[in-house]
Amino acid sequence: MATAAQRRIKSVSYAKYGYMFILPFFVVYFIFSFWPLIQTFILAFSENGTRTPGIIGLDNFKTILAKPAESDFKAMGIHESFWNGMKNTLIIWFGNFIPQIALSLLLAVWFTDLRVKMPGKGFFKVVMYMPNIITAASVAGLFLSLFGDSSYSVINTLLRSGQEPWKIITSCWPSRILVMFIQVWMWFGNTMIMLMSGIQGINESLFEAAEIDGANSTQTFWRITFPLLKTIMVYTLLTSMIGGLQMFDIPYMLHTGNVVNDYIKTVAVFIYEMFHGNFAKPSFGYSGAASVILFVITSILGALVFYVQRDKDAIEKKKKQKQAAKEWKRKQKGGGFSI
């Protein structure tokens, strides 16, 4: 029999200390994330031009999404600029994600394969991850000096000396391909590290059994590694999707003459230009509406990915458990178990 003192000691709860430790996160999140998100939704349904506008409903969304009258030049320009940014965002994201995931997966499998005896693996891992920690401004400045439209850029000095310089930054596909390459170069190391962590989490006995059975590297990859990387691949897809739709820094800073090339102007650049007055004065309402549209698109795509990649066996098992529980309750109400 426990004494009264022992019962009092057991009843002491330390949960409040846990809440105290996580409180700073919620405070910072509310100030810097949740409150700005609420303000963005308010601006999306508000009149343009001032920071304290009146509510005007869905007019900002109609201007952005639906084609306005051709006589309204400002609205027509905003509508076309938004959809041009959306097209550029999707093109650049697809163009950099596919080679990025292919290269990262190849290197992750290579670095984690115990049969590959290559000296200096740790060095190469660090070198490949380093572009991810360089600031976007530095990267944009580097590639502007290399591929700029000026005759003094590195590529034009070496290959076009005394001739008409190549206009890579202001051309359509050359500028897009350059942004795609920069995005792959900056982020493939981070993706590679995540995929390596996923591969290293797979039970080594599976690879040993495959090797004993005579499976080669290709068969081991497609039958063991790739199927068991499903969770980390979904995470990589979601983070890349969110980052791709919010792509801003490289496309915005990779320009000359303070004018962003229309071929690489993304939705995030459109939102920035609207907020800072690209059309004579700030258009906070259009900026907020475009942000909300981007938020909804990201949420829908994320939900779709989770739906496609859901564990169907686990869902079916859960349904059977619920049906069994309902049957048990029905029998209980009916007067007990049947023999």
Image (cartoon, helix red, strand yellow):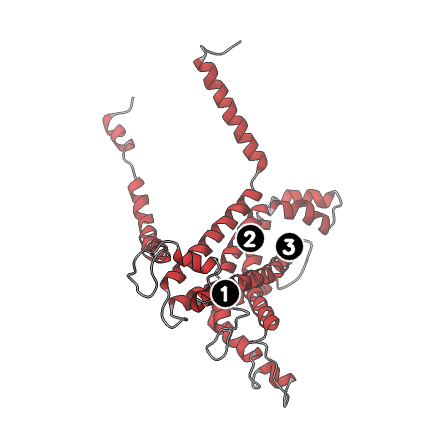
Please report the residue visible at 53 percent of the width from the left and 55 percent of the height from the top: 241
| Amino acid under disc 2 | Leu
The numbered mark at residue 109 is 3
Q: Real-space Cα distance between discs 2 and 3?
A: 18 Å
Which residue is situated farthest in the left direction here? 4
Which residue is situated farthest in the right direction here? 214
* Number of residues whose C-alpha sits closer than 10 Å to that of mark 2, classed few (under 14), some (14–19) or many (20 or more): some
Residue underneath mark 2: 237
Q: Give the number of the mark in front: 2 or 3.
A: 2
Q: Does 259 appear above or below 321?
A: below
| Amino acid under disc 3 | Val
The image quarter in which residue 172 lies: bottom right
Q: In this view of the protein, can residue 309 be seen by the observer?
A: no
**Front residue of this view, candidates 26 and 308:** 308
SS at mark 2? helix
Q: Give the number of the mark in front: 3 or 1.
A: 1
